[in-house]
Amino acid sequence: MLGKSKGTGLDGSFVQCAGCKKTLFKREFEDNLYVCPQCGHHHRLTWQQRVALTFDDGSFQELDSALRSGDPLEFPEYREKLEAAMAKTGMNDSVVAGVATIDGAHVSTAIADFSFMGGSMGSVAGEKITRTLERAAEDQKPAIIFCASGGARMQEGLLSLMQMAKTTAAVAKCREAGAPYIAVFTDPTMAGVLASYASIADVILAEPKALVGFAGARVSAQAQVTKVPDDFQKAEFGERSGMLDKIVERRALKQTLSSLVRVLGGGVR
């Protein structure tokens, strides 16, 4: 079971698609893995739903769960926002990390959850991503990271931006160790996350129509000097431009990841 969806609209037996706005039968929507059967819109998943969809039953073991962000800059209302996000989501930060198996193959993994402060990358999220990659390098097993973020967490200032360099260095450790690294762009994958560990994976997959870009849509619109394609900053544009390798529908994602893990080597113990 993937559990209940968040933010899908109406209560009771029906939900509203965030894409086409049509009313859907809730059971049909959930059975279709939170993808609209009318327009194909891939709704955002919680980290628990992502784990249930991707990994072998009961195989996921969370690590680094005690890590929590401080308030190093004493940014106004940051501590209150952190506590509110923790209470709302039951998470300590925007990324959950651990180890799991996928069709029997062992992997190191991290899953970003947009429901925690927009999936923003602060010190804790960056540390968890780094440890995920370092575990993969040390154990010579694949790393799979699900990206979902609006970018760096402004309330932590340069400490947040440092995570871009730190996570990028961790990717280099995987390369040196021969540990494959697969990134999955989900909606949205933006800004400092895209500009660091997300875009330098060995293989980059994306869910259909995921928002992928550096600046937000409104900022990009203000900077445009020429007309851009209608799907600019969408996964489909990124695939055509060579930014990512393949767009994979949610129902086929586990099999695709399993095949990649076995083809790229390692992971089976």
Image (spheres, rainbow, N blue to C red):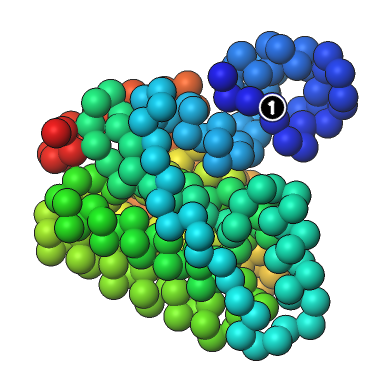
Q: Looking at the image, is 15 positioned above or below residue 108?
A: above
Task: Give the x, y percent position of residue 205.
Answer: 39, 42
Residue 265 vs residue 220: left or right? left
Counting the numbered discs, the total is 1
For mark 1, what is the residue? 4
Nearer to me, 101 or 13: 101
Residue at 29% x, 72% y is 169
Q: Most extreme residue toward the front, as rendered? A: 66
Q: Amino acid at mark 1?
A: Lys
Quadrant for the N terminus in the image: top right
Quadrant for the C terminus in the image: top left
Residue 66 vs residue 141: left or right? right
Residue 238 vs residue 233: left or right? left
- The answer to which image quadrant residue 187 occupies is top right
Task: Give the x, y percent position of residue 152.
Answer: 57, 70
Please tell me how crowded label 1 is: few (under 14), some (14-19), or many (20+) other residues with Cα within 10 Å: some
- The answer to which image quadrant residue 64 occupies is bottom left
Residue 191 seen: no
Task: Give the x, y percent position of residue 148.
Answer: 55, 51
Residue at 34% x, 62% y is 131
Secondary structure of the residue carrying numbered label 1: loop
Residue at 69% x, 27% y is 4
Q: Most extreme residue toward the right, as rendered? A: 11
Residue 262 seen: yes
Residue at 73% x, 73% y is 79
Task: Give the x, y percent position of residue 156.
Answer: 61, 80
